[in-house]
Amino acid sequence: MSASVYGDFLNQRLNVRAEQNALRKLLPANADLIDFSSNDYLGLSRSHELHDIIAAEYELVMKSGEFRWNGSAGSRLLNGDSAVAHLTEKFLADFFRSESALIFNSGYTANVALMSALPSRTSTVLYDEKIHASVRDGIRMNGCRAWSFRHNDLTHLEELLSKSTNEIWVVVESVYSMDGDSPDAKQLTELCERYNAALIVDEAHSGGIYGEQGKGWCVENEIENRVFARLFTFGKAYGVHGAAVCGSETLRTYLVNFARPFIYSTTLPVRDVIAIREAVKFASACDSERSQLSGLIDYFRALHKTSSCAYSITDSHSPVQGVIVPGNSKVRELSKQCLRESIDVRAVLAPTVEPGVERLRVILHSFNTKAEVDRLMNVLIKSDADHR
Ligand SMILES: Cc1ncc(COP(=O)(O)O)c(C=O)c1O
């Protein structure tokens, strides 16, 4: 078959997406816009201070004999391993209060690694229906039995737990990336313990923000010792890149031996590993940013409640606030309207979310101002009035 036939095949599928008004397009970030879109919750991706600390630490490490200036030149299991990675993992384990930590190239990779490696063919995985795509992809690679339970519905989870056999793995997010809400930590942990299920918590959206010094949602809820594994990502509140799985020493050894994304991929360069360590240290001291952020979340919610904005918002007390605007074209148009007012807020379309609950995913940051929130709310109110 000729290349053009394959081109036609791809175009047909792209056309279906376009007809559904759901064609994805790349849009470079624009620093001139008001950022209600990035996951840079504490502004660390743009922090000159953190940048300079990372650069200085990198120079120090290089002077001390580290010889791989650019790439890591291999998987950790070949010769891409470094003393810096081990020391950073020790630091992360101590900081997040776990026995061990293992660094991954990204949160996506870490979830695929966990879910493809941990369950056996006869295990059961129970996951929240709103879990991140990376968890689903890992489960698919594994081929084990997997059931989803209704979002944050522990009664439904219990129903499924009572039908599960062998090892049971329960996977949740501490803060859901689309709705911004969280499960009930205590009840969830007790339930998993009652059924002897291993609980895995994806802390992608809580690391750096929740708990003392940003140690996360499990630490805030004092369940870190009752959770089988916690996943932290460093590309969101920490402003850098990569991820780490925190858990027992046995879990770490197991992943080194069985997690294919860890084994068969070139590991992060030393500079990125140093960036992780320094970003976690830096964020631990960002109490004023955390309190500014939490004040802004309260402000946004209070303003929405008292304003005439008719769009509902998700039940979230996190920086992720979903403004429900049903219909792909309507939510897309609203996102464009925001852009015309120099506001960067992205539309989340079906099929990423269920049809009918398409939304503007508003991300609040410590560096956003109340005036910026007012401006966003005014666009929402005006657009809603125009549609009535
Ligand atoms: C809940 C959740 N887990 C994992 C990931 C993946 O993390 P990363 O961006 O580091 O690959 C994301 C990112 O969108 C996420 O929202």
Image (cartoon, rainbow, N blue to C red):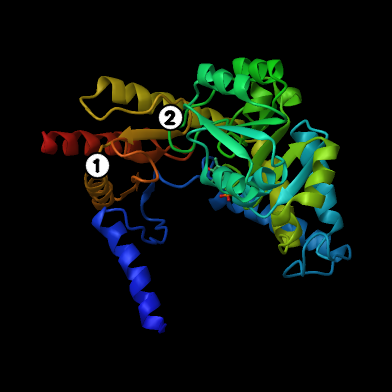
Q: Position of residue 81 (x, y in %)?
A: 83, 60
Give me the residue at 83% from left, 34% from top.
99
Relative side of 266 to 162, left or right: right
Numbered disc 1: secondary structure: loop
**Left or right, residue 40 beside residue 186:** left
Which numbered disc, 1 or 2, marks the residue that appears first in the sequence?
Answer: 2
Q: Position of residue 261 (x, y in %)?
A: 69, 56
Q: Is residue 345 visible?
A: no
Q: Nearer the viewer, residue 368 or 71?
A: 71
Q: Quadrant of residue 54?
A: bottom right
32 vs 280: above or below:
below
Judge from the rendering whether residue 362 lies leftward or rightward of residue 153; answer left or right. Answer: left
Quadrant showing the N terminus: bottom left
The disc label shown at residue 296, or none: 2
The image shows residue 355, relative to residue 80, as above or below, that is above
Q: What's under tag 2, amino acid-wise? A: Leu
Name the residue at 58% across, 43% down.
Answer: 135
Of residue 139 and residue 202, the one placed in the foreground of this image is: 139
Q: Which mark is residue 327?
A: 1
Identify the image quadrant of residue 374. top left
Q: Secondary structure at mark 2?
A: helix
Q: Classify 188 as above or below 61.
A: above
Which of labels 1 and 2 is toward the front? 1
Q: Which residue is pictured at 32% across the width and 35% down the height?
A: 357
User: Does 60 sit left or right of 142 as displayed?
Assistant: right
Indicate the position of residue 314 as horizontal and vertical percent values: 38, 28
Q: Marks 1/2: CA distance?
A: 28 Å
Image quadrant holding the C terminus, namely top left
Label of residue 174 in the image? none
Residue 137 appears in the picture as rendered: yes
Percent x, y of residue 222: 69, 20
> Which amino acid, mark 1?
Gly
